[in-house]
Image: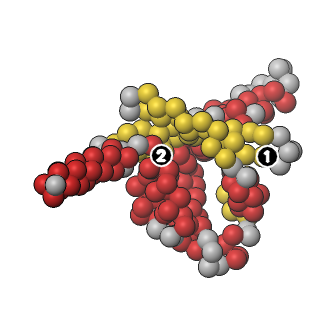
């Protein structure tokens, strides 16, 4: 009788161990780790699961494309010069500084979110990119809910639905990639669509 109980406990322990190790390799687990990193103000854990550098780089490119498209629409067709190449060149020159600045602001936000009210209630201003109002961003994130999470091989898409400034629901889509035994958010795939 005792032998059967020990065998049963051993099987339960093995199944539990295998199940937990599998759970740690899912996108859902990585999302929980991101949430835990923000709650515990752990920048290093956050950066393990979120590729901040890549998201900012692609985000700046998307903002630039949206701005150029908007400026081309507003310019007359008879304009002598195409300023879009100049604008792209200028953004490429300042992009490293802008990324560095925004990365530091994100680090500060995570580290000091609940400790320092002035960090939460301020506008992050990068002149070429326009102002970023963190209070509006935080209130939008507060209303964010997971809309979908689809996984195919080593890529997953996460949709976060939130209520925008105009009261309409919007979905921000993030791409996650599997690295070894964890998933990492690497890109915001529809920023240009949201901005446009």
Asked whether, in this view, residue 106 is left or right of residue 167, the answer is: left
Outermost residue toward the front? 1
Q: Which residue is mark 2?
A: 28
Q: Which residue is mark 1?
A: 164
Residue at image x 62%, y 79%? 115
Where residue 79 appears, x then y in whole percent? 81, 25
135 vs 169: above or below: below
Residue at image x 38%, y 28%? 153
108 vs 174: above or below: below
Of residues 50 and 98, the one drawn nearer to the viewer in this rendering: 50
Q: CA distance from mark 2 to mark 1?
A: 25 Å
Residue at image x 59%, y 67%? 109
Residue at image x 37%, y 39%? 178
Where residue 175 appears, x then y in whole percent? 51, 37
Where residue 176 appears, x then y in whole percent? 47, 39
Outermost residue toward the bottom? 115
122 vs 20: above or below: below
The quarter of the displayed image where residue 101 is located: bottom right
Number of numbered discs: 2
Asked whether, in this view, residue 93 is left or right of residue 130, the answer is: left
| SS for callout 2 | helix
């Amino acid at each position: 009788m005792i032998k059967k109980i020990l065998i049963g406990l051993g099987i339960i322990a093995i199944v539990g161990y295998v199940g937990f190790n599998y759970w740690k390799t899912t996108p859902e687990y990585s999302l929980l780790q991101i949430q835990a990193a923000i709650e515990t103000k752990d920048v290093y854990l956050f950066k393990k699961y979120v590729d901040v550098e890549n998201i900012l780089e692609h985000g700046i490119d998307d903002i630039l494309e949206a701005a150029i498209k908007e400026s081309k629409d507003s310019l007359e067709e008879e304009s002598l010069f195409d300023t879009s190449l100049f604008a792209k060149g200028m953004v490429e020159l300042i992009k490293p500084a802008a990324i560095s600045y925004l990365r530091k602001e994100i680090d500060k936000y995570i580290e000091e979110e609940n400790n320092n009210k002035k960090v939460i209630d301020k506008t992050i201003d990068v002149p070429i990119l326009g102002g970023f109002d963190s209070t509006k961003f935080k209130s939008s994130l507060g209303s964010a809910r997971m809309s979908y999470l689809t996984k195919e091989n080593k890529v997953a898409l996460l949709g976060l639905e939130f209520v925008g400034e105009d009261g309409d629901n919007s979905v921000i889509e993030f791409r996650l990639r599997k690295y070894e035994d964890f998933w990492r958010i690497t890109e915001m795939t529809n920023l240009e669509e949201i901005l446009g």
